Amino acid sequence: MSKLSVVLPAYNEELMVGKTCRVLAEVLTKAKIPYELVVVNDGSGDRTWEEIQKAGERDANVTGVLFSRNFGKEAAIFAGLAQACGNVVAVMDCDLQHPPQTLIEMYRLWQEGYEVIEGVKADRGKEGFLHKECAGFFYDIMSKATKVNMKDASDFKMMDRKAVDSILSMPERNMFFRATSSWVGYKTTSVEFEVQEREAGVSKWSPWSLVKYAFTNIVAFTTFPLQFVTITGAICFICSLVLMVYSLVQYFTGSAVEGYTTLLMVLLLVGSAMMISLGIIGYYISKIYEEVKRRPRYIISKVIKNGNIQD
Ligand code: UDP
Ligand code: MG
């Protein structure tokens, strides 16, 4: 049987990481799937690394990667993919919210010849109404822009070595894993899973970080906001044409002075439209700047492999 690598990004998961490794080892051993767990410690401030070390001592199939600081989940996933050596690689959260049993189903589908197996949320769990609506809106934009259905997408997936190598060959720094894994193509299918309750620890997402996440990924993956700038510009232009005609008529009928309110409103409106547009363009430029700097996506400080620490 072919080896399965499971990539697990971990940030402040001291309460979960040990258990997750144990449960995965148990489930995969029982299913007779040769495995490797690649746990990437994304600069945690707690005892996550110690827990990963312990897991590595218990089980030689656990590989640990330590980042020099927090680089974010996407970077952690990428580092895990680069480290993984299996013929097939899965990515999942390390808080057991993605059910390990689903891995077996995904593995069977891979054996049947599918090259990308997407985990799709059967139900968005206990997320609030506003969160669900905003997530729905965000994935609508992303689906339209990428022409891939991303509704209820998650980072839980399994990929053939070919797809992993394609993702690793992509040079951009701002990676949006959910979209990238569909973007590379290949024979794809999906598996529904129930989002489990988090047993311990806390979610790393605040409302503000979700907004930032959404905006970064829209900018990294689409040019829709730039089109929005053009459309706003066009609307403003049409409005100003109407107003120009109106004020000309006022001028020729001799009642020109009272236009103060209109003038003020137009100034404010056009001014704010321009500020928004400049902001959006500025955001793209900052992303381009990040890309041209060619900085590494992440910095690795230590690796544990086969129970040995490599500095
Ligand atoms: N995570 C990470 N780096 C970060 C934030 C999160 O590696 O900066 C990991 C985290 O440890 C977990 C996964 O990403 O394994 C999902 O995070 P979380 O459970 O907080 O998100 P939620 O399930 O609430 O969407
Ligand atoms: Mg979680």
Image (cartoon, rainbow, N blue to C red):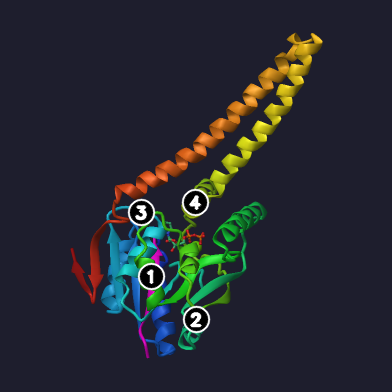
* Residue of label 3: 71
Count how many numbered circles sit on residues in the image: 4
Pick whichever of labels 2 and 3 is earlier in the sequence: 3
User: Picture coordinates of residue 252 (x, y %)?
Assistant: 78, 12
Would you place residue 152 above or below residue 45 in this image?
A: below
The residues tagged by marks 2 and 3 sit, at their Cα atoms, a distance apart of: 28 Å
Q: In screen coordinates, is 8 left or right of 237?
A: left
Pick whichever of labels 1 and 3 is earlier in the sequence: 3
Residue farthest to the front, as pictured: 252
Pick whichever of labels 2 and 1 is earlier in the sequence: 2
At mark 1, the secondary structure is helix
Residue, x 63% and y 54% (percent of image)? 137
Would you place residue 209 above or below residue 163 in this image?
A: above
The residues tagged by marks 2 and 1 sit, at their Cα atoms, a distance apart of: 20 Å
At mark 2, the secondary structure is helix
Check contact, mark 2 vs mark 1: CB within 8 A: no
Tell me, yes or no, if residue 99 can be seen here: no
